[in-house]
Image (tube, grey):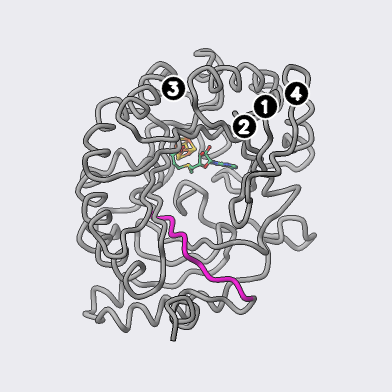
Amino acid sequence: MTAIQETTQTGLADRYGRVATDLRVSLTDRCNLRCTYCMPEEGLDWLAKPELLTDDEVIRLVSIAVTHLGVNEIRFTGGEPLLRRGLVGIVASTTQLTPRPEVSLTTNGIGLARQAQALKDAGLDRVNVSLDTIRPDTFKRLTRRDRASDVVAGLEAAQAAGLTPVKVNAVLMRGVNDAEAPELLEFCLDRGYELRFIEQMPLDAQHGWDRSTMITADEILETLSGRFALTPDDASKRGSAPAESFLVEGGPQTVGIIASVTRPFCGDCDRVRLTADGQVRDCLFARTESDLRTALRNGADDAELADRWRRAMLQKLPGHGINDPSFLQPSRPMSAIGG
Ligand code: SAM
Ligand code: SF4
């Protein structure tokens, strides 16, 4: 049997022919920003410490995913993963696994200036930093915190440490930062960061998402086209990558658009998620979860945990259903799932 056949038979296959190889691990549901599209000003009822997987438990489950289940990409996220005290150690253990997975981090960048080199030394490959605006006043309005300069410093430190390519994620909100998209792109192009705009999704804790006010991929393209010549990047093999890529002024630099709402890419999804409290989620929008923490704490061995994880994938639906009239937002918000 070839290695590829083996992975397909023993990996994280769903009922629709997709195999998950990209694991998003939430290390905490807490955050030091309060982005309006994500959570309310007062924050949320954070998970209690005993509910959180310990560092060793995270490493055990990540190790099972890589060595038993064919996962070859690990992204640590949250909440804000830089708030997790054991982050560097978790990254170091993950990068020592065989086969060596790609390891990346999605962060709001606050405190990255301090930790970038240690993360690089631990083997981290890349970072995605969220930055929706380069104007400090807009940043404060969007995140309810006056920390724009910390994020810019974090981006610089990530690049200096070689956590490249540095990617920037941006969400646009109508009447807040949508008109600033071209200047954000200019900022990223000047510094060699890869910018991707993400359509706002119905995953905020306040359930305030409204289809009629969200900024669509078409609108983003139109706004950017006022300043830049954009052409589809045919050379980029999109595969399971969610971002549609466009060459800016003929290339080689690009800008990406992740149109989860208006151009869903569920048919090519290769993701699976593990929450900070040890629940497998087969989709951001899943309304069910599979508990690995209880089995793990009750002494299940690796084979049993792997088997539970495989079975969890069989519940994965063909699509997220945002555009169905019967769509119901999941009870956990993005910050508690791991974006
Ligand atoms: N705190 C980190 C950060 O902001 O990068 C990691 C977690 S955050 C939930 C991951 C990504 O999700 C960020 O890029 C953020 O902008 C995005 N995000 C949060 N809420 C969103 C929403 N309702 N729709 C689309 N993207 C969202
Ligand atoms: Fe925090 Fe990230 Fe949510 Fe903003 S998007 S509040 S940085 S978890």
Pointer 1 with pointer 2, Cβ within 8 A: yes
Report the mark closest to the observer, 3 or 2: 2
Residue that numbered label 3 is attached to: 145
Q: How many marks?
A: 4
Mark 4 surroundings: few (<14), some (14-19) or many (≥20) residues within 10 A: few
Label 1, label 4: how far apart the Cα atoms are? 6 Å
Q: Considering the numbered disc 2 on the image, is that residue within a helix, a strand or a loop?
A: strand
Residue located 56% across and 21% down the image:
189
Residue that numbered label 1 is attached to: 248
> What number is the disc on residue 5?
none
Label 1, label 2: how far apart the Cα atoms are? 5 Å
Measuring from the top left, give residue 60's x and y in whole percent: 25, 66
Mark 3 surroundings: few (<14), some (14-19) or many (≥20) residues within 10 A: some
The image quarter containing residue 175 is top right
> What number is the disc on residue 229?
4
Report the mark closest to the observer, 4 or 3: 4
User: Which quarter of the image is occupied by the N terminus?
Assistant: bottom left
Ligand 1 near label 2 (Cβ, under 8 Å)?
Answer: no
Q: Considering the numbered disc 4 on the image, is that residue within a helix, a strand or a loop?
A: loop
Pointer 1 with pointer 4, Cβ within 8 A: yes
**What type of secondary structure mainly makes up the magenta span?**
strand
Which label's residue is closer to the chain start, 3 or 2? 3
For residue 193, side relative to residue 244 (left or right): left
Amino acid carrying label 1: it is Val
Measuring from the top left, give residue 79's x and y in whole percent: 41, 44
Label 4, label 2: how far apart the Cα atoms are? 11 Å
Residue that numbered label 2 is attached to: 254
Pointer 3 with pointer 2, Cβ within 8 A: no
Mark 1 surroundings: few (<14), some (14-19) or many (≥20) residues within 10 A: many
The image quarter containing residue 42 is top left
Ligand 1 near label 1 (Cβ, under 8 Å)?
Answer: no
Residues drawn in magenta: 17-25
